[in-house]
Amino acid sequence: MTIRPATRSDVPRIVALLADDALGAIRESPGDLGPYEAAFDAVAADPAQLLVVATTGDGEGDGEVVGTLQLTFIPGLARRGALRAQVEAVRVASSARGAGLGETLLRWAVQESRRRGAALVQLTSDAARPDAHRFYERLGFTATHVGFKLAL
């Protein structure tokens, strides 16, 4: 497996990964890639954003995209001016789940966050995903906060 920055040509596969579960099937619209392509362009243009894909193979050629996540680096004054890394949209292809790919992706994200000087890695997980919560806790994340969202 190789983890690399996503390219615009990866957008259809990333969207398919986002839609490949019960919650994603409701939230995503893989038939209309326009909004996703515009979002990709915005993410790619922002140095505080890093969208990656995990592919089969060794990085040579066109391995199949089997995972993705986005890292956002957030500067702030809290915690003595600490840089935070926010992990979003972690997805592993249903055909590849249970093989350690998610763990590899998250460990890579933590390492990359450390390399960029982040003092904290944070993420949220939908309350309807108890298996994901156990997974994150197994990797050392702790459920220290309660998250709130307001749809606009």
Image (spheres, rainbow, N blue to C red):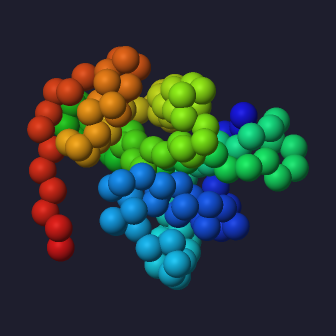
Is 110 positioned to the left or the right of 129 in the image?
Answer: right
Regarding residue 83, the answer to whether it shows in the image is no
- Which residue is pictured at 46% across the width and 60% down the height? 19
x and y, in percent, of residue 4 in the image: 68, 45
- Which residue is pictured at 36% across the width and 54% down the height? 22
x and y, in percent, of residue 122 in the image: 32, 35
Regarding residue 95, the answer to whether it shows in the image is yes
- Which residue is pictured at 31% across the width and 24% down the height? 134
Please state which of residues 101 and 59 is positioned toward the viewer in this rendering.
101
Please state which of residues 91 and 26 is positioned toward the viewer in this rendering.
26
Q: How many marks do you count on the picture?
A: 0
Residue 125 found in image quarter: top left
Please state which of residues 63 and 96 is positioned toward the viewer in this rendering.
96
Is 121 positioned to the left or the right of 63 in the image?
Answer: left
Is 90 positioned to the left or the right of 127 in the image?
Answer: right
Q: Classify the position of the C terminus by image quarter.
A: bottom left
x and y, in percent, of residue 96 in the image: 61, 37
x and y, in percent, of residue 46 in the image: 50, 62
Residue 121 found in image quarter: top left
Q: Is residue 109 above or below residue 18?
A: above
